[in-house]
Amino acid sequence: MPWSFEEYLRLKGEEVNVIKESNIERAYSLFEKRYENEIAGFLKKGSFPEIALEEKEEEIRRYVKNSTVEKLVFEDLPKIFPIEDIHKLYDILVFLLKSNGSIVNLSNIGSVIGLSKDTVKRYIFYLQKSLILNQIEVYGSIGKVLRKGKKIYAACPSIAFVYQDYYNEPNLVENAVLNKLLEYFDSVRFYREKKGLVEGKEIDFIVNGIPIEVKWQSYITPNDLKGIFNFMEKFKVKVGFVVSKKFDVIEKNSKKIYVLPLDFFLLSDFREFLS
């Protein structure tokens, strides 16, 4: 797994411990609310301890891209896997990182890159095995999993950051939330209704049947919670979570949604909240 927010803070000299407390309100009352200003640094460079103290963005990008990712792709992968065109494999990687967290359409990627669908699928498999990418499947039956596309994320926010055209903080936050969930759970999925992407019909992550949304904003409106409440109603779930900027607890029809600030979420043992 990539370095955690806790490890990143420790590397910068902070003394911090992951909160292990099943009562969420009590856990938040114990939380030291002083790490918000460290989030951007963690998203940009937190998975690479060698540059934890680096402040220049151009140096961060150079190190992650040139000294790590490109070295892995162009030097290491060809020694292990049968790759006919390493430059096109790299093009696929860049394409996926720029659309980080999107549902993957192998045929579309093949058309853009100039490769067959099967070759694209094989190259993505190589990139996953090299620990550059993570893949999550749709929530539902085996048949639904096979029919629907998969979402692909960078192995950590820092890799996505250096390949995107601008600092897309909401996207990197979503990536960081996924990494935290993968640290604790064997299966992390996303939810999408079969009729396609309609407002309120997609949930970012599902673990143990519990919905988790990422809404990177200061205030959560009722419309923001429409999708997660719909999921909870459909699947008879009593609790859900939203990762955002401020703490809140929202109740509706005997169902409860906890809105958790990102720094609190990253420094808590989320398994305790589901116990």
Image (tube, rainbow, N blue to C red):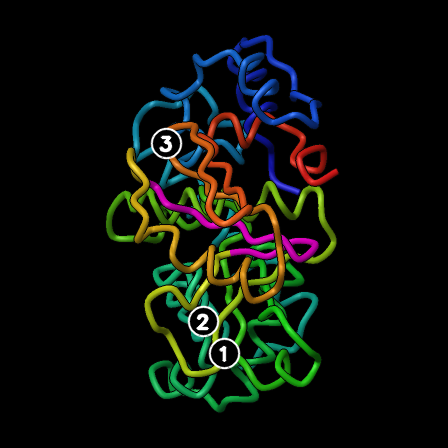
The amino acid marked with disc number 1 is Asp
Image coordinates for residue 268, horizontal then vertical, percent: 62, 27
Disc 3 secondary structure class:
loop
Q: Mark 3 points at which residue?
A: 245
Q: In this view, does 116 lie to the left or right of 18?
A: left
Upstream in the sequence, badge 2 or badge 3? 2
Q: Residue at x 61, y 20 (%)?
A: 27
Q: Return the residue at label 1.
A: 85
Q: In the image shown, does 1 or 171 lie closer to the viewer?
A: 171
Quadrant of res 81: bottom right
Q: Give the range drawn in magenta.
A: 205-216
Q: Give residue 103's mark.
A: 2
Q: Where is residue 169 in the image (x, y as percent from the top left)?
A: 32, 42
Find numbered disc 2 in the image and state the secondary structure of the residue it sits on: loop
Of the residues tagged 3 and 1, which is closer to the observer? 3
- Kindly check if marks 2 and 3 are in contact, taking CB atoms under 8 A apart as contact: no
Residue 21 picture location, percent across and down: 69, 23
Q: How far apart are marks 1 and 2 (CA)?
A: 24 Å
Q: Which residue lies furthest to the left in this view?
A: 166
> Residue 172, relative to residue 86: is it above or below?
above
